[in-house]
Image (cartoon, grey):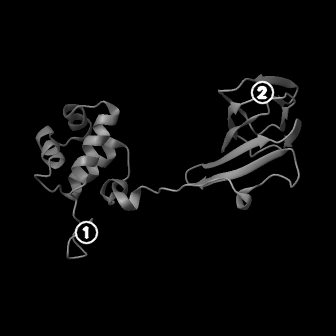
Amino acid sequence: MPFTDNKNDLNLDYLGTFIRSFRSAKGESLQVLAQRSGVSKSMIAQIESGKTSPTISVLAKLAQAMEISLRDLVQPPEHSLNLHSTRPDDNNVVSKKNSVFVCHLLANEQRHFCTKVYRFYFTAPGKTSFAANKPGSQKHLWLEEGTLTVYIANKRILIPEQTLTTFNASIPHRFDSATQKLARGLFFVVY
């Protein structure tokens, strides 16, 4: 349970595990985090082992050194995971009906920047065109299987399966799947 009986008192039992996991993921020692944060190595060790409850000042220093918000550091894990799963279905199809190109919008995140995640596949040989995305947009295309030809301006790029290709999406472009093994994959638009 993330809160104590008094709803105004935070129970930070998970905090030590969070900080230790952060250090582990970065391959960072207690000493390195202590140097970057200005919090003593022994204080961090006590927080990680649950032997002490840190002050807001200590938490702020640790959050800054870890390059995360103070809120993300102290928010109970079940509130901060922001976990969401999406499966392709009829409700998230964004391509034209009866097109040989089928495209599902799986995610549309808008925070500091916008990321849209799409799953696509061809049902028959064919092509589809994309208008220019916003200036500065990047498209990251993961081709899971098949062969795909991407036309960007006057360039023709043949993309083999199991390849990630990134390009400027603010230029109109098109996909063409003309082989027997039809293209299937994901693309991410970031702007």
- Which image quarter: residue 165? top right
Q: x, y (%) of residue 114?
A: 62, 50
Q: Residue at x 84, y 24 (%)?
A: 155
Q: Is residue 119 left or right of residue 94?
A: left
Between residue 36 and residue 181, name the one nearer to us: 181
Amino acid type, residue under disc 1 in the picture: Phe
Residue 147: numbered disc: 2
Mark 1 falls on what kind of element?
loop
- Badge 1 is on which residue? 3
Mark 2 falls on what kind of element?
loop
Tag nearer the camera, 2 or 1:
2
Query: Split into 4 quadrants, where in the image is the C terminus?
Result: top right
Q: Is residue 139 placed above or below 14 in the rendered structure?
A: above
Q: x, y (%) of residue 84?
A: 52, 56
Amino acid type, residue under disc 2 in the picture: Thr
Q: x, y (%) of residue 65?
A: 31, 42
Q: Earlier in the sequence, mark 2 or mark 1?
A: 1
Between residue 85 and residue 2, name the one nearer to us: 85
Q: CA distance from mark 2 to mark 1?
A: 53 Å
